[in-house]
């Protein structure tokens, strides 16, 4: 006999988020032909609920409403109920989130949308409470009102729904006017971005405060381009504030999703693979530019966290770690002074608590989120101990408290493996391997690349998600664009030409299946994807780069590496169509601005003729990888498999570097010092 009173159609799914709802009394379906057909046959509206496993309020709504038998009965009687994991089906999420924002002015998760049997949205919102609160109708009242309206006001609903579909199409159409690509677009974007900078706490806007790694990466590039010292100061202030705040996990490494306050203190505690991919790369770049060991340490601790806790035995990277454990948000991560002193003893415990702001009153629901409000030198002076003594207590405390924390009940982990997010992390590992000389990072990147190409393809086409030994769902634009980008970095970390071959092949599919030859830009879904009410295009850089901005950068890199100008025209077209918009709204197009910076700069094409494994060649490569050069491509080898290596011979049998910019080449050099001088210029 089953231990569960109820089981619905989600029990056959692999998504951890869908499986969390498999034993609700709600008769949930996944998005499927069966569910859509039943809605038409029974002429019932669809209740579409979209969320993801690390979403705190998704869990709350499940407990309050979807586990409530009376509410479930209303849902089952009046609707066909479909549950979607937004991370598996970002196409559905994009369409219906845009619709909800049009209808309500707001969006977020959990998202609740009511559709006609033809999948057209006519009412929606986000979280609904289980009863009427503060003048707002509760979920049962919403259900009954929507059902009644569907039966009694069908003509009005269908008219409004048709208008929404038209508005969706208009919202994603591109302006026919193309702008000339000039550096003043970048200057304007910088000025607009600085308008929202928080000069007290770092970052952009007030609260909630998101890390915005792509905007900070754009400012790093802009500092190099303009030599404006203030831009570097802004980036560094933000990196310092985040690294000292509660948004960073001081014991285990890695970043939480965002801070609910403007001070980076209290996070939403979930950890997302894409955040740690983008932030580890940002801190790595800051280290390469400033040589400050603190940034290197944060980058390595973040990547080490991913290796330790977010890597599958097969080499894939898991998606998320939840915010909640034992039914409470953040419980796994917070401490009391007594808990600290029980592990460290009185003296070290007192020093640790003073440094990490652990107090009797607490800073989060009576407990403490570790954060560093004062520098070690000040804490040592206040504690009347040498700074070395304080540092010893901190390092011992980090080690022992981490070991103690490992014995707690851990937050749950979403172990599905997404192609796009894995590709983001692969690029970060590959670039860290090259910059830091970490062979374990190189192996992790290569292993993940092998895993994705072996397990998330069918008939040469990418699949979106993998779990429990199987992959499914069509790959989206971001899956292709991120993976092409990652494979280029993987080549530069290993100099194995196979990665370039795979990047070229996937880029060909990207053009064939996603490019819009009439309106320009790339569609979110492939030409042979399931037909939905709308075929979206996504240009906004949100928590991750948009597929269009990732493609615009990856195709430029591919063109520069291979010498094939054909890839460049697609990137240039996207940049020209979005140029004016991204300059006016830089926070929404930060990665696309990085692609524009690449285009307007003189990217260095570096070819090193020599055996990549030879010691002298490695010394030359170190000059390339151990400095901040965001706009570069590099090939290395003894053959002529790449255009950049054709006719490039070793001089006097020595590894020889050739550096070109837009077809203009410097004289070849054979010493690390000479190469360093070329790159510095």
Image (cartoon, rainbow, N blue to C red):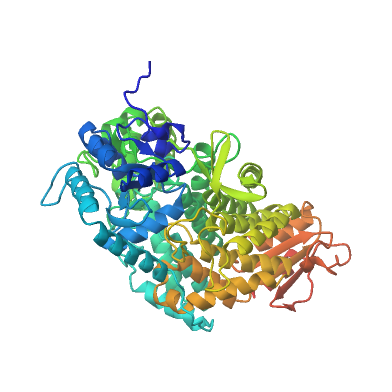
Q: Between residue 29 and residue 318, name the one nearer to us.
A: 29
Q: Which residue is drawn at 72% across and 74% down?
A: 660
Hey, which residue is sitting farthest right in the picture?
652
Hey, which residue is sitting farthest left in the picture?
135
Up the image or down, 644 lies above or below 310; here it is below
Q: Report if residue 677 is visible in the image.
A: no
Location of the C terminus (image quadrant): bottom right
**Total residue callouts:** 0
Q: Residue at x 39, y 61 (%)?
A: 238
Q: Report if residue 323 is visible in the image.
A: yes
Where residue 279 appears, as percent x and y from the top left, is 47, 55
Q: Between residue 94 and residue 116, name the one nearer to us.
A: 116
Q: Between residue 320 and residue 184, name the one nearer to us.
A: 320
| Left or right of 225 on screen, residue 632 | right
Hey, which residue is sitting farthest top in the picture?
1
Q: Between residue 213 and residue 225, name the one nearer to us.
A: 213
Where residue 547 appears, as percent x and y from the top left, is 52, 61
Up the image or down, 616 lies above or below 63; here it is below
The quarter of the displayed image where residue 664 is located: bottom right
Where residue 510 appears, as percent x and y from the top left, is 61, 60
| Left or right of 244 on screen, residue 319 | right
The quarter of the displayed image where residue 405 is located: top left
Where residue 556 appears, as percent x and y from the top left, is 63, 69
Location of the N terminus (image quadrant): top left
């Amino acid at each position: 006999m089953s231990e569960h009173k109820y089981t619905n159609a989600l029990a056959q799914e692999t998504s951890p988020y869908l499986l969390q709802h498999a034993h609700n009394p709600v008769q949930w379906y996944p998005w499927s032909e069966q569910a859509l057909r039943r809605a038409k046959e029974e002429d019932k509206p669809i209740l579409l609920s979209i969320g993801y496993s690390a979403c705190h309020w998704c869990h709350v709504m499940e407990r309050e409403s979807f586990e409530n038998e009376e509410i479930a009965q209303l849902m089952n009687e009046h609707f066909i109920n479909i549950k979607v994991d937004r991370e598996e089906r970002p196409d559905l999420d994009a369409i219906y989130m845009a619709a909800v924002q049009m209808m309500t002015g707001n969006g977020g998760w959990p998202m609740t949308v009511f559709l006609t049997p033809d999948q057209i949205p006519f009412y929606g919102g986000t979280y609904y409470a289980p009863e009427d609160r503060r003048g707002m109708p509760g979920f049962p009242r919403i259900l009954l009102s929507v059902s009644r309206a569907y039966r009694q006001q069908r003509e009005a609903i269908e008219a409004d729904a048709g208008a929404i579909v038209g508005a969706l199409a208009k919202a994603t159409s591109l302006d026919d006017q193309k702008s000339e690509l000039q550096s003043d677009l970048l200057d304007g974007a910088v000025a607009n971005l600085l308008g929202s900078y928080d000069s007290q706490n770092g970052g952009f806007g007030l609260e909630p405060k998101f890390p915005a790694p792509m905007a900070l990466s754009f400012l790093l590039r802009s500092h190099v381009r303009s030599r404006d010292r203030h831009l570097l100061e802004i980036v560094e202030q933000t990196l310092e504030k985040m690294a000292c705040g509660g948004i960073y996990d001081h014991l285990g490494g890695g970043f939480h999703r965002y801070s609910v306050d403007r001070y980076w203190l209290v996070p939403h505690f979930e950890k997302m693979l894409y955040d740690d991919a983008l932030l580890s790369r940002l801190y790595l770049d800051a280290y390469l530019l400033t040589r400050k060991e603190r940034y290197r340490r944060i980058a390595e601790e973040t990547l080490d966290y991913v290796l330790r806790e977010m890597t599958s035995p097969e080499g894939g990277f898991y998606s998320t770690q939840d915010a909640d454990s034992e039914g409470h948000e953040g419980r796994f991560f917070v401490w009391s002074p007594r808990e600290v002193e029980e592990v460290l003893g009185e003296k070290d415990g007192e020093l640790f608590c003073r440094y990490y702001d652990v107090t009797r009153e607490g800073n989060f629901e009576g407990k403490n989120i570790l954060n560093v409000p004062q520098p070690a030198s000040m804490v040592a002076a206040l504690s009347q101990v040498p700074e070395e003594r304080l540092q010893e207590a901190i390092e011992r405390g980090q080690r022992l408290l981490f070991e103690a924390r490992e014995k707690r009940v851990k937050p749950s982990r979403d172990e599905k493996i997404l192609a796009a997010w894995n590709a983001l992390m692969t690029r970060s590992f590959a670039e860290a391997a090259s910059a830091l000389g970490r062979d374990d990072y190189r192996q992790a990147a290569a292993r993940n690349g092998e895993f994705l190409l072996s397990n998330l393809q069918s008939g040469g086409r990418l699949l979106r998600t993998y779990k429990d030994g199987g992959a499914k769902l069509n790959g989206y634009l971001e899956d292709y664009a991120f993976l092409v980008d990652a494979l280029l970095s993987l080549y530069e970390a290993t100099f194995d030409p196979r990665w370039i071959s795979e990047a070229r092949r996937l880029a060909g599919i990207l053009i064939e299946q996603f490019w819009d030859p009439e309106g320009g830009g790339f569609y979110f879904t492939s030409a042979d994807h399931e037909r939905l009410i709308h075929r979206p295009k996504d240009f906004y850089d949100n928590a991750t780069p948009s597929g269009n901005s990732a493609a615009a950068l990856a195709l430029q890199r591919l063109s520069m590496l291979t010498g094939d100008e054909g890839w460049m025209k697609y990137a240039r077209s996207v940049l020209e169509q979005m140029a004016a918009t991204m300059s006016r709204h830089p926070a929404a197009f930060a990665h696309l601005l990085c692609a524009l910076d690449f285009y307007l700069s003189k990217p260095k094409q570096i070819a090193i003729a020599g055996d990549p494994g030879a010691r002298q060649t490695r010394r030359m490569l170190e000059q390339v990888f151990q400095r901040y050069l965001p706009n570069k491509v590099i090939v290395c080898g003894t053959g002529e498999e790449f255009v950049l290596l054709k006719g490039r011979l070793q001089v006097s049998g020595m590894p020889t570097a050739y550096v070109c910019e837009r077809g203009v080449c410097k004289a070849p050099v054979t010493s690390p010092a000479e190469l360093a001088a070329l790159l510095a210029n």
